[in-house]
Image (cartoon, grey):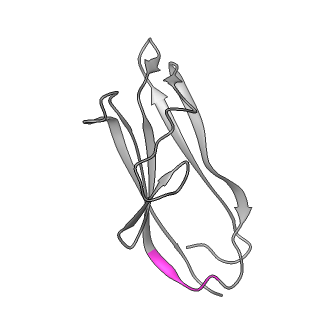
Amino acid sequence: MFHAGDICWCRAVVCNAGDTPLDGYPLFVILDVYGSLYWAPSFNTTFDHYLALYSSFPPGSTVVEVLPSFPWPDNTGTASGLLWYGALTNPEITDIFGDFDVVTFGWETD
């Protein structure tokens, strides 16, 4: 749960344990606000992904900044049970490649 003034951010980490780059594998990150889905990087409601920004994931870890650091604002009301999803798909966008990650979060007025 976030409170006013807390420093927040969102980063996705792609861990390529292989010996060769993953070329053309779209990374998607979704914000689920009570069933309304917003796709990063543009945060619109139409499928979107990071392929244009990260066309290849080399061996090792690649950090993708989904949201830069910012202080949580005042007067945001209260919300809980919101979800961030993140995963890599195969180039055909027909299957998840690797592990799928989900984070639950919320905020409350002090």
State the count of labels: 0
Residue 85, x across and y down, in percent? 41, 53
In-front residue for pair 56/4:
56
Confirm whether the magenta stretch covers residue 50.
no
Question: Is the C terminus in the top left, top right, bottom left or bottom right quadrant?
Answer: bottom right
Residue 53, x across and y down, in percent? 58, 33
Residue 107, x across and y down, in percent? 56, 76
Outermost residue toward the front?
A: 46
- Judge whether 68 appears above or below 73 on screen: above
Residue 109, x across and y down, in percent? 62, 86
In-front residue for pair 85/99:
85
Q: Residue at x 46, y 77 (%)?
A: 80
Confirm whether the magenta stretch covers residue 79.
yes
Which image quadrant is residue 83 in? Answer: bottom left
- Judge whether 24 appears above or below 44 on screen: above
- Judge whether 86 appears above or below 108 on screen: above
Outermost residue toward the top?
A: 19
Magenta part of the chain: 76-80
